[in-house]
Image: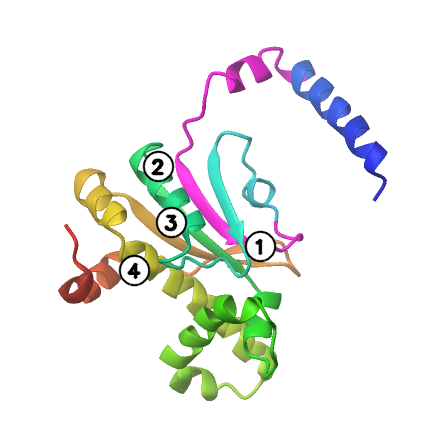
Amino acid sequence: MDFNKVFENNENWIAEKIRTNPDYFKDMNKGQSPSLLYIGCSDSRVSAEELMGLEPGEAFVHRNIANMVISIDLNVMSVVNYAINHLKVNHIVICGHYQCGGVKAAMQAQDLGILNPWLRNIRDVYRLHRDELNQIKDEQLRYDRLVELNVQEQCINIIKTAAFQEAFIERGIQIHGWVFEIKSGKLIDLKIDFVKHLKDIQEIYKLM
């Protein structure tokens, strides 16, 4: 990468935006009112706004290794609470992707140092769904299915929060689980029934 080219690209981007809309940056400077929170993977091949065809200001974005929502991670929990309580988003998207290095690394029998406690949460997803996953003989297909199940579990982790439960009661906030297929560029909706999951966990996780 030629870093000098970055600033040239920036100038070209500014010129193009102003050419199509002279007030583009003036309007952006007024503030943000995104309708959705997107939580995705840090993988460099998965660009949040681009894959959804959205402009800056339309999505509040958080990315980390393997699109995790961990209750003791103050970073992601601050993002979730700010998006729900202050930005008043009505949709939350957890988006994983096939060929996820984080998911694959979690299933390797090796010491990955500081990554160990983070990736342990993916191992927990495998443990919860071990019977289903162990029946899949093809290793790559098993990893793909773990990617999907990890997305589902992170959606459930959002549902467990007081912020989500309150927003669901007050304004019917929704959560969606997607997977990005890198080889085709397609977004796949896992059609997670979050209302069913909410009912299933309320005995233990009901906070509102």
Q: Report the front residue among 122 and 192.
A: 122
Residue type (three-letter) at the residue carrying disc 1: Lys
Q: Residues within 10 Å of mark 4 (few under 14, many from 20)?
A: few
* Disc with the residue nearer the chain's start (1 vs 2): 2
Tell me the residue that label 1 is attached to.
186
Tell me the residue that label 3 is attached to.
77
For mark 1, give the secondary structure: strand
Residue 100 visible, this orientation: no
* Disc with the residue nearer the chain's start (2 vs 4): 2
Residue 37 visible, this orientation: yes
Left or right: residue 89 versus residue 4 is left
For mark 4, give the secondary structure: loop
Q: Residues within 10 Å of mark 2 (few under 14, many from 20)?
A: many
Q: Residue 157: horizontal and vertical position, in percent?
A: 33, 59
**111 shown above or below 24:** below
**152 shown above or below 131:** above
Q: CA distance from mark 3 to mark 1?
A: 28 Å
Q: Nearer the viewer, mark 1 or mark 2?
A: 2
Q: Which mark is residue 193?
A: 4
* Disc with the residue nearer the chain's start (3 vs 1): 3
